[in-house]
Image (cartoon, rainbow, N blue to C red):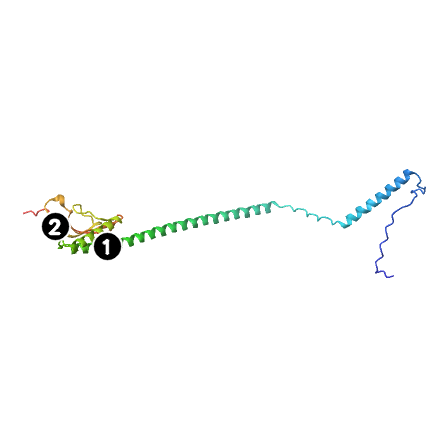
Amino acid sequence: MSDNKKSAPSPKVNDKRRFDNEGNLRNSAEDKGAYRQEVAEEAAQESIEEIREETPLPPQEEPQQSISPDEVLHLQSELEAARARVDMLARAYQELERDKEDFKRRLQRERERMLELEKGKVALLLIEAADELELCLKNADDSPLSVGVRMIRENLLKKLKENEVVLLEVAGTVFDPKLAEAIDLQRVDNPDDNMKVLEVLRPGYAYKEQVIRPARVRVARHMPPADA
């Protein structure tokens, strides 16, 4: 046979001899019991060996490598840097949220302001319509047409008042350029009447405390007499 061929494993033979190691015949019950015990121990040992061969050994854990103090300090510095980065991003996100809320509030205020301006423009159109109706009624009689026009004007003024459009009461007060326009001056002798509104030539109106049309007035002006 060639040397390359593997030799067949030798068969296992259970020792069933009836003689002990000294060559004496096992006749007594004690010898037979010892013989049976030896056979049982050999069989148990063979079973244990077979189980060991069939059962894979668990993988051995690699011993943990120790970390040097320098590596610990490096990891701690990286952790602190990561925490600082997270804090910075959190603050930036909070700032962004605040800016977004501020922008929403500014946008809402601007929208409300534009809406108030548009309402003021509409109110101004109604005021001009009421002024034209008043011009029509200057020389009107008591005819049904005149009564109807007067009722329309009164309803317009009523609607304006209900929508917070109020008439500026400037007659007899000190002239205020924010409320009225002085289109005429009238000389007076009493110094206490100086710069007072003597007559309202065109009424003025305000919408929610904002003047949408200043009044046109005649203002008193006191001038001391010239020395003779």
Eye-nearest disc, 2 or 1: 1
Taking the image as drawn, is residue 164 in sight? no
The amino acid pointed to by label 2 is: Gln
Farthest-out residue, right: 24
Mark 1 falls on what kind of element? helix
**Residue density around tag 2, few if under 14, some if 14–19, many if 20 or more, within 10 Å:** few
Residue that label 1 marks? 126
Numbered mark located on residue 186 in the image:
2
Q: Residues within 10 Å of mark 1 (few under 14, many from 20)?
A: some
Does residue 34 appear anywhere in the picture?
yes
Does dot 2 land on a helix, a strand or a loop? strand
Instruction: Give the percent coordinates (x, y) of residue 11.
Output: 86, 52
Q: Residue at x 48, y 49 (%)?
A: 89
> What percent of the width, then of the height, locates residue 141?
13, 54
Quadrant for residue 193, please give it: top left
Considering depth in this image, is 58 or 158 the residue closer to the camera? 158
Residue at image location 13% in from the left, 43% down from the top: 192
Residue 116, percent across and down? 30, 52
**Location of residue 61 with respect to 125 vertically, above or below:** above
Q: Is residue 86 left or right of residue 115?
A: right
Q: Residue furthest bottom?
A: 2
Amino acid type, label 1? Leu
Name, please, the residue furthest toward the front: 144
